[in-house]
Image: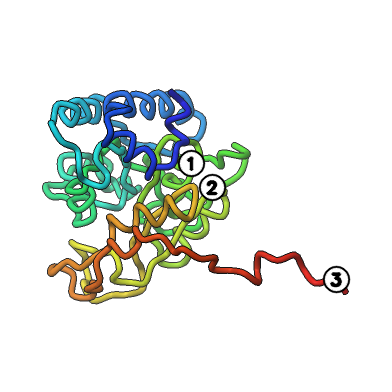
Amino acid sequence: MSELCFTAPRRLARLLRSRQVSAAELMRAFIAQIERLNPQVNAIVTFRPEQALKAARALDRRKKSDRPLDGLPIAYKDLLPTKDIRTTYGSTIYADHVPAQDHALVERLASAGAITLGKTNTPEFGAGSQTFNAVFGATRNPYDLSKTCGGSSGGAAVAVACGMLPFADGSDLAASLRNPGNFCNVVGFRPTPGRVPNWPAGNAWQTLSTLGPIGRTVDDTAFLLSAMAGPDPRSPVSIAEPGSLFARSLKRSTCPLLCQPPISR
C-alpha cells in the first residue's frame, strides 16, 4: 500500500480510471501514511480521513471516472478558504474559523475530481521563510527533524516529500513555493501571476503573490498545474490560456547544455 503513496500522480490517475486501483484503496494508503509519519513532521494540521474516505467510496460507485484528478487526495495550504473546513491562516485569531465558501482553486480542483483530505501548515498569515505558528506549532524537515522545512508552503512540501500527498498547492510572494521545495527535495513552482486565479482576494489586481503547485518531480508538478491553471472571470488578472497546456509532453530536452559535464580546464 505504501508504494501507492510514491507512485506518480499521473500514473495513479490512470490506475484509478482503469479500475486497477479503487479510490478507497488509494485513500486508505494515504491516510495510513499520514497517520504513520505526520506525528513526526506536523505537515497536515487539519485532517479529515472519514470524509475523504466517504468521498472516495462514492467515486468508486460511479460508472465512469473521467475527470483528470478523480480520486486523488489533496490537502490545501491553510491560507486557502475551504467551505465547512477549518481555515486558520496559522493565526490564533482564526483558530476556530470555518469559511462559508471555497476558494476558486478549491472549487476548480474539486471539479477536476480531487478529494480534500485536510489542510497543510503555514506560518501566521503566510509571512515567513519557516513554517511554524502558535496554533499548530512547527513543521519539521523530513530529512532532519531538527531542521526547518522552509516556508511558507512548508507543510505542503513536507507532505509531498513524505508521500502523505501525491502533490499539493502552495503560494509564493518571496519564494514561499521555491524555498520549501529546495529544503525538502521536491519541486515548488512559482507560475506567472494570474496563471492560477486567486479569488476571493483582498486586492484582485495585485500580482506580487501567486498560487502554484508542489510535486516530487517536474512532471508531477506540471500535472497538477494543468488542473490549477486557466482563466476565471472573478479574477481580473487571470491569464486566458487554458491549464491543459501544461498537460502536454515537451518531447524534447530543455537543458542540453546544462546537462553536460563541466568543461575540463
Residue that carries the numbered disc 2 in the rendered image: 149
Q: Residues within 10 Å of mark 2 (few under 14, many from 20)?
A: many
Residue 139: assigned label: 1
Estimate how packed mark 1 is, as few (under 14), some (14 to 19) or many (20 or more) residues with alpha carbons within 10 Å. many
Image quadrant in which the N terminus is located? top left
Please state the horizontal and vertical placement of residue 243, each as a whole percent of the image.
Answer: 28, 63
SS of the residue under disc 3: loop
The residues bearing labels 3 and 1 have C-alpha atoms spaced at a distance of: 43 Å
Q: Is residue 157 left or right of residue 84?
A: right
Residue at (33, 72) in percent of width and height: 193
Q: What is the secondary structure assignment of the residue under circle 2?
A: loop
Q: Is residue 88 above or below residue 202?
A: above
Q: Give SS at disc 1.
A: loop
Q: Indicate the amino acid at tag 3.
A: Ser
**What is the three-letter code of the residue carrying label 2?**
Cys
Position of 182 compared to 78: left or right?
right
At horizontal 37% and vertical 45% (from top left) the residue drawn is 10
Query: Are discs 3 and 2 less than 8 Å apart at CB?
Result: no
User: Contact, CB < 8 Å: mark 2 with mark 1?
Assistant: yes
**Location of residue 156 in the rendering, given as x and y in whole percent from the top left corner:** 42, 46
Mark 2 and mark 1: span between their CA atoms? 7 Å
Quarter of image, res 118: top left
Coordinates of residue 144 in the picture (x, y in percent)? 63, 39
Which residue is tagged 3?
Answer: 264
